[in-house]
Amino acid sequence: MSKSVFSEKYNRFRKLLIKARQLANLTQSELSAKLSRPQSYISKYERGERRLDLIEFLEVAKALQIEPATFIKKLLEEKEEN
């Protein structure tokens, strides 16, 4: 098991989070305001400089108004397609 935040699995996770933010028509600054976090928090996990733990992911999903289970299903489906 790789510990790198730059693993292919994590890259897919990051790309889906970025896409979800964009589909919600939110900038990094707007999302960070919803989460009461600095904009750099969003930037760092989107670039892969930091990992999100499960609780943080759930907070981001809530702010983006996405269903976590649906998001994870999409992540797993993309893995199977590649």
Image: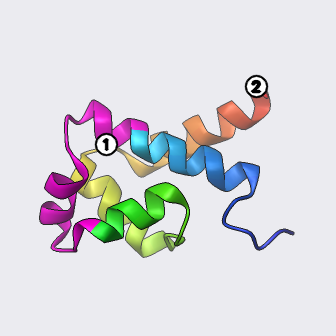
Where residue 3 sits: x, y (%)? 77, 74
Tell me which corner region of the image, top left, top right, bottom left or bottom right, holds residue 2. bottom right
Tell me which corner region of the image, top left, top right, bottom left or bottom right, holds residue 40. bottom left
Looking at the image, residue 58 lies above or below residue 73: below
Looking at the image, residue 69 lies above or below residue 1: above
Residue topped by disc 2: 81
Which residue lies at the image location 87% right of the left edge and 69% below the top edge? 1
Residue topped by disc 1: 21
Amino acid type, callout 2: Glu
Q: Earlier in the sequence, mark 2 or mark 1?
A: 1
Q: Which residues are magenta?
A: 19-39
Residue 21 lies in magenta, yes or no?
yes
Q: In the drawing, does residue 79 fall left or right of residue 1?
A: left
Predominant secondary structure in magenta?
helix
Q: Nearer the viewer, mark 2 or mark 1?
A: 1
Which residue lies at the image location 41% right of the left edge and 36% below the top edge? 19
Q: Secondary structure at mark 1?
A: helix
Which residue lies at the image location 57% right of the left edge and 49% below the top edge? 13
Amino acid type, callout 1: Arg
